[in-house]
Image (cartoon, coloured by chain):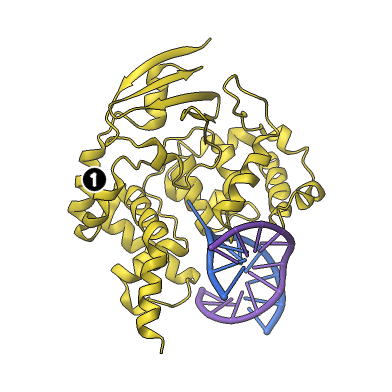
Chain colours: A yellow, B purple, C blue
Amino acid sequence: MIHQYRIAISIQEINLERTLRSGQTFRWKKDDSGIWQGADGNAWFSLRQTEDSIDVSSNVDEPTTRLYLDLDRSFADFAAHVAAHGSELSPMLSGMQGLRVLNATGTLETVFTFLCSGNNSLHRIIPMAGYLGGKGSLWPNGAYRFPDLDQLLEVTEAELRSAGFGYRAKFIVQSAARMRDQGGETWLHQLRNATYDQAWPELTSLPGIGRKIADCICLFGLGHQDAVPIDTHLWQQLTRLYHPDLVGESLTASRYEYVSRAFRDRFGPVAGWAHQFLFEDNVVNGRSRRADRTSSDVR
DNA sequence: TACGGACCTTTC
DNA sequence: AAAGGTCCGT
């Protein structure tokens, strides 16, 4: 059955373009008509956004879509909350209206696509995520349902190697096998009911998943919004804003723990959202900021 | 326990 | 050289 409905909401409250291209999910596509085609877990969505509404076609009802897009929380309230805990983020917020952290339920997809993300760039992560997604079945909107664990278990390391996955091929095959041994998707989804502190060590027990990717899975795939993935972008931001003595230093495990805890202490339950703004700001502005610094420092 | 180097491949 | 890191050996 196909549901069709219009959700009245301003583009300041949720900006699909900004949100779906912010690197928390990798398989959404905007078609030639400007409609976003995607899938998450058991759902598929066609979304057409205007200034004040989103027209939805989907196999799920409106409450389910609202939950996925997290629409029942106010972006404006949230942004105010972030600004109250860190005024240094205020200047960034005006350019990031409607950038949200989605409430994905397809946790298996989060695990295996972020397994592709390490030491990699978006230009390559997206086609890799698309390749894995293609192992699943086709939804009516042209998006692929992400394969289940049994389907992933059929993929071989040799195949992924030849598909350009590099050394991540082994991690993917090994993690799929390990997950099966630990209880499969039942085990994974049960981490949703666990706390962040409980879920994190479970995830890092999978090969290829270290502290950063475990934090991504906690935040983007399990709904643990106190998780703070610290990648190279966050590290640049956090050192610049809060730990100037560490600027330019390498991100070691001990520094990760230290900086991560400090950020969580500052922003509490909205730490994950605050992280998303800092990440996005660095992706957009970081290069020029680095260029400014080096051009004035060097020579 | 903690750091530094290797690691696939593509793109800037 | 750097990319939204992780693993391994010292």
Residue in the picture at 35% in, 74% down: A292
Instruction: Between residue A51 and residue A15, name the one nearer to us.
Output: A51
Q: Would you say A213 lies left or right of A97 here?
A: right
**Residue at 72% from the left image edge and 44% from the top image edge:** A177
> For this view, does A114 lie left or right of residue A229?
right
Residue located farthest toward the front when viewing the structure as drawn: A32
The answer to whether residue A115 is seen in the rendering is no
Query: How far across and down, in percent of the image, does residue A15 sit?
Result: 35, 37
> On the rendered image, what quadrant is the C terminus of chain A found in?
bottom left
- Residue A262 or residue A41, whichever sits in front: A41
Packing grade of label 1 (10 A; few <14, some 14-19, many >=20) is many
Tell me where residue A117 appears, x and y as whole percent.
Answer: 58, 53
Left or right placement of residue B2 versus residue B6 in this view: left
Quadrant for residue A155, please give it.
Answer: top right
Which residue sits furthest top?
A: A1
- Mark 1 = which residue? A79
**Looking at the picture, how far across and down is residue A185, in whole percent?**
61, 34
SS label for mark 1: helix
**Count of picture labels:** 1
Q: Is residue A185 above or below residue A203?
A: above
Residue at 35% of width from left, 70% of height from top? Answer: A239
Q: Is residue A54 left or right of residue A137?
A: left
Q: Is residue A170 visible?
A: yes
Query: Three-letter amino acid code at disc 1?
Result: Ala
